[in-house]
Image (tube, helix red, strand yellow):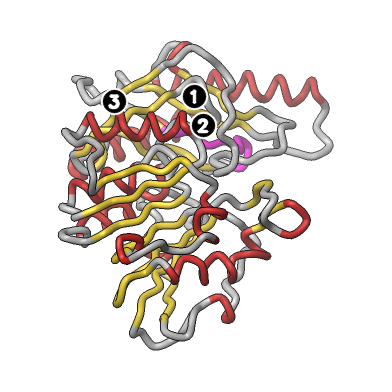
């Protein structure tokens, strides 16, 4: 059942991906109730047959809360066998990230810790751009597939603009902005590992850091709280995809919660916006509700989630995304 579903999805999405210039996509997301799993597919840019030469990244979840450990293990083995058969791949090309009783969900933005050291890397394509993914060593592979449409939107509107990318991870938004002709980019993340990865992504696309295109290793919350230093810290486009939760000495109770603390965060973002600037703000929090008090008086706010989630994602609530801009009628 699961294997047949994967084979059918692969036939459809491989053709769709070629037309879109995409070599990585979501194949399966809890489509069959008996198999609560997520399967993403990553094909190297040089693969002759993208349906057979890729790797599957898999998250497996427990079916029932009262399931015994033995039942869970048996189900996991069955699901893995179905995936291998449906995609016709050997075991070494299936990378299982989360299993059964682990509490974190697939794609949690705060889950950046290293879990392996095999460095199973590929270069994949997205809208003609090239990105390094690491399929083995981290809970996430280096490219959040659910933000693909928003990255393309940033690229299409980046010409001549100054772009700020916060909580930047491996810098995919900044790479798209550079490809779209951005006049300047500032890419901020706390992790040196991911900023180095961003530099490799730049190089894959023929770009490098310079006086106009810089990276900053910093806690984004503290960096924003310090405020803009001068007009060079004013941006036409700001991208902010913060974690749902993180520890931070600056926040109350020593932690940051996007549900609780987003009004202050958005007000900080607005201070960095140039006249007529725009902010793309997104979250993966399932309980998030945008507070009317979060939107500065000179900004309008519109939810664009119906356009920001890709066609290959069955779960249309994988994230929520808003565009804030000066001069719009203030509405949610």
Is residue 46 rendered magenta in the image?
no
Q: Residue at x 67, y 55 (%)?
A: 250
Q: Is residue 41 left or right of residue 295?
A: left
Residues at discs 2 and 1 in contact (Cβ within 8 Å) = yes
Q: Residue furthest front?
A: 229
Tell me the residue that label 2 is attached to.
2
263 and 223: which one is in front? Answer: 223
Q: Earlier in the sequence, mark 2 or mark 1?
A: 2
- Observer-side mark, 2 or 1, equals 1
Tell me the residue that label 3 is attached to.
123
Quadrant for residue 198, please give it: top left
Residue 138 place in picture, x, y as percent: 53, 26
| Mark 3: few/some/many CA within 10 Å (<14, 14-19, 20+) | some
Quadrant for residue 132, please give it: top left
Q: Which mark is residue 115?
A: none
Q: Which element carries disc 2, helix, strand or loop? A: helix
Residue 171 place in picture, x, y as percent: 36, 41
């Amino acid at each position: 059942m699961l294997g047949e579903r994967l084979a059918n999805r692969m036939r459809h999405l491989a053709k769709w991906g070629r037309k879109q210039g995409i070599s990585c996509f979501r194949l399966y997301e809890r489509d069959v109730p008996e198999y609560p799993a997520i399967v993403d597919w990553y094909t190297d840019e040089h693969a002759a047959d993208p349906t057979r030469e890729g790797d599957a990244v898999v998250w497996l979840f427990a079916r029932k809360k009262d399931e015994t450990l033995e039942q869970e293990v048996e189900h996991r083995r069955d699901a893995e066998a179905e995936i291998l058969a449906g995609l016709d791949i050997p075991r070494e090309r299936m990378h299982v990230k989360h299993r059964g009783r682990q509490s974190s969900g697939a794609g949690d933005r705060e889950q950046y810790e290293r879990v392996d050291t095999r460095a199973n890397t590929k270069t994949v394509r997205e809208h003609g751009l090239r990105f390094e993914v690491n399929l083995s060593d981290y809970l996430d592979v280096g490219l959040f597939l659910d933000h693909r449409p928003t990255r393309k939107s940033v690229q299409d509107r980046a010409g001549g603009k100054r772009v700020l990318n916060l909580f930047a991870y491996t810098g995919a938004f900044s790479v798209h902005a550079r490809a779209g002709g951005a006049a300047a980019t500032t890419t901020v993340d706390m992790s040196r590992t991911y900023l180095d990865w961003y530099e490799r992504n730049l190089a894959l696309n023929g770009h490098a850091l310079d006086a106009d295109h810089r990276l900053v290793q910093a806690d984004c919350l503290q960096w924003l709280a310090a405020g803009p230093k001068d007009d060079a810290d004013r941006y036409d486009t700001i991208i902010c995809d913060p974690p749902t939760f993180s520890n931070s000495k600056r926040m109350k109770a020593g932690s940051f919660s996007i549900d609780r603390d987003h009004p202050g965060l958005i007000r900080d973002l607005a201070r960095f916006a140039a006249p007529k600037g725009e902010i793309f703000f997104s979250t993966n929090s399932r309980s998030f509700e945008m507070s009317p008090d979060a939107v500065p008086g000179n900004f309008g706010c519109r939810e664009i989630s119906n356009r920001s989630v890709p066609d290959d994602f069955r779960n249309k609530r994988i994230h929520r995304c808003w565009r804030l801009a000066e001069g719009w009628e203030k509405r949610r």
